[in-house]
């Protein structure tokens, strides 16, 4: 009986040993599997993992090697802060101490300098661990340089956009598809008197537009959302500012690509429109004045013609008949000459010859015009000399000067015939 009990206990012990060996085998398999998973994570992860102990790198994964440019041998055993950008080094030490002391896992950003000298932005999370029985830091980091570059470009773009938006010099607003004003610049405030805080997201642009222009501007807004090319880019309309004053604006509008927002830019042309209206009124007044002047000139011309007719009629009726009586009367020959001269002079005054000669040939002296009149009447040089009480040679000189001034010296033209042709 005792032997059987011992054999039974032995079998139980063997069974327990076999079970323990099997459990240990499963643990070893699990440990191996766990280590394989850990190594896979470290080797294949897109995130950089490292362990720092006593201020030096102890473990780094391939991702750390990839974005720093340093080899494994160049990293392991080296001070962990040797790549940190000088401007970030002090702040990073402070952040690290705070995160470890408070056991915070929130990420933070800093810059490193790669082996090639490139600056890269990193986002990192750290946690305290034990490594080979000593306190250590487990860090995992991501290269966010591309994101930071995009953010910087976006920030510069936004700064440029806001600068242009504010400094454009014109009233500029952005209008949503429901006509709500979502953004205004300071020029809009100056133009309308409405403040940003009272406008953005609270007013529609129709609340500023003169009601007389509502119908066609509503239609333009509808069309620009459907087909921006179907509406004019520039046009004029009226607004009513906060004080109730109507202002005229020269306007440019367009749909922002990829959105249903309309950007609207306007320039105050009220003063120009007022001047234009004033000039229109003056233009109409000038047209009326010109019409009046034309009537007056026509009347003056008629009066002048009437005066000429009256003068001609009076001379012919009241002067020339008496001269004819004198010529037919018995008067001395020397006085008859004067009568003839008076008769000839009056006829010349009444004829177009005198006017043509004095206007067309203004270079002739009064005496030369008098001699020309007598030549035209057929008087000889001697007769003209007797009439004017001068020598015949003096009349010959006058003849020469008259021909010269009339451009006849080198022509075979008869002076009397030429003068007669002017009548």
Image (spheres, rainbow, N blue to C red):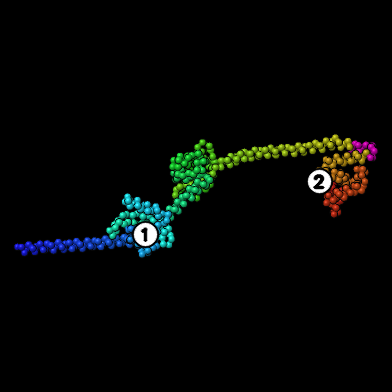
The residue where tag 2 is placed is: 362
Seen in the picture, residue 418 relative to 28 is either above or below; the reply is: above
In the image, taking residue 306 as reference, residue 253 lies left or right, namely: left
The residue lying at 73 percent from left, 37 percent from top is 299
Start-end of magenta stretch = 324-334
Which of the 4 quarters of the picture holds residue 81?
A: bottom left
In what element is the residue under mark 1?
A: loop
The residue lying at 70 percent from left, 39 percent from top is 294
- Marking on residue 101: none
Question: Considering only order in the chain, which callout, 2 or 1, is on the residue closer to the N terminus?
Answer: 1
In the image, taking residue 102 as reference, residue 311 lies left or right, namely: right
Residue 351, percent across and down?
82, 42
The residue lying at 46 percent from left, 50 percent from top is 158
- Quadrant (top left/top right/bottom left/bottom right) for the N terminus: bottom left
The residue where tag 1 is placed is: 79
Mark 2 is surrounded, within 10 Å at the Cα level, by few (under 14), some (14 to 19) or many (20 or more) other residues, namely few
Q: Residue furthest front?
A: 54
Which of the 4 quarters of the picture holds residue 57?
A: bottom left
Residue 234, percent across and down?
53, 47
**Foreground pick, 81 / 118:** 81
In what element is the residue under mark 2?
A: loop
Seen in the picture, residue 362 relative to 125 is either above or below; the reply is: above
- Visible residue check, residue 182: yes
Q: How many marks?
A: 2
- Using the numbered discs, state the Cα–Cα distance from disc 1 to disc 2 in whole angstroms: 112 Å
Which of the 4 quarters of the picture holds residue 53?
A: bottom left
- Visible residue check, residue 257: no
**Foreground pick, 4 / 347:** 4
């Amino acid at each position: 009986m005792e032997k059987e009990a011992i054999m039974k206990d032995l079998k139980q012990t063997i069974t327990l040993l076999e079970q323990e060996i099997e459990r240990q085998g499963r643990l070893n398999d699990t440990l191996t599997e766990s280590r394989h998973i850990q190594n896979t994570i470290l080797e294949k992860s897109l995130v950089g993992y490292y362990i720092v102990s006593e201020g030096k790198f102890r473990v780094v994964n391939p991702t750390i090697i990839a974005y720093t440019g340093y080899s494994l041998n160049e990293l392991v055993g080296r001070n962990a802060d040797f790549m940190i950008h000088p401007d970030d080094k002090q702040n990073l030490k402070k952040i690290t101490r705070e995160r470890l002391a408070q056991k915070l896992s929130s990420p933070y950003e800093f810059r490193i300098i790669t082996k090639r000298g490139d600056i890269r932005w990193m986002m990192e999370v750290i946690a305290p661990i034990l490594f080979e029985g000593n306190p250590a830091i487990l860090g995992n980091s991501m290269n966010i340089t591309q994101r930071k570059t995009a953010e910087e470009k976006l920030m510069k773009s936004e700064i440029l956009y806001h600068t242009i938006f504010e400094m454009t010099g014109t009233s500029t607003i952005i209008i949503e598809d429901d006509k709500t004003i979502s953004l205004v610049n300071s020029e809009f405030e100056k133009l309308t008197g409405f403040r940003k805080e009272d406008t953005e997201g609270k007013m529609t642009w129709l609340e500023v537009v003169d009601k007389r222009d509502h119908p066609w501007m509503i239609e333009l807004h509808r069309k620009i959302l459907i087909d921006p090319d179907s509406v004019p880019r520039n046009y004029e309309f009226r607004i009513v500012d906060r004080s109730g004053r109507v202002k005229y604006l020269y306007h440019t509008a367009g749909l922002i690509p990829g959105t249903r927002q309309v950007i609207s830019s306007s320039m105050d042309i009220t003063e120009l429109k007022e001047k234009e209206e004033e000039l229109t009124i003056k233009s109409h007044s000038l047209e009326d004045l010109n019409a009046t002047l034309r009537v007056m000139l026509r009347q003056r011309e008629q009066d002048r013609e009437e005066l000429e007719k009256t003068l001609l009629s009076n001379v012919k009726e009241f002067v020339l008949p008496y001269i004819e009586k004198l010529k037919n009367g018995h008067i001395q020959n020397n006085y008859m000459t004067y009568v003839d001269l008076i008769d000839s002079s009056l006829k010349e005054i009444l004829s177009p010859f005198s006017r043509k000669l004095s206007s067309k040939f203004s270079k002739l002296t009064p005496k030369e015009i008098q001699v020309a009149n007598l030549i035209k009447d057929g008087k000889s040089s001697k007769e003209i000399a007797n009439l004017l009480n001068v020598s015949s040679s003096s009349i010959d000189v006058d003849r020469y000067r008259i021909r010269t001034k009339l451009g006849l010296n080198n022509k075979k033209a008869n002076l009397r015939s030429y003068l007669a042709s002017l009548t």
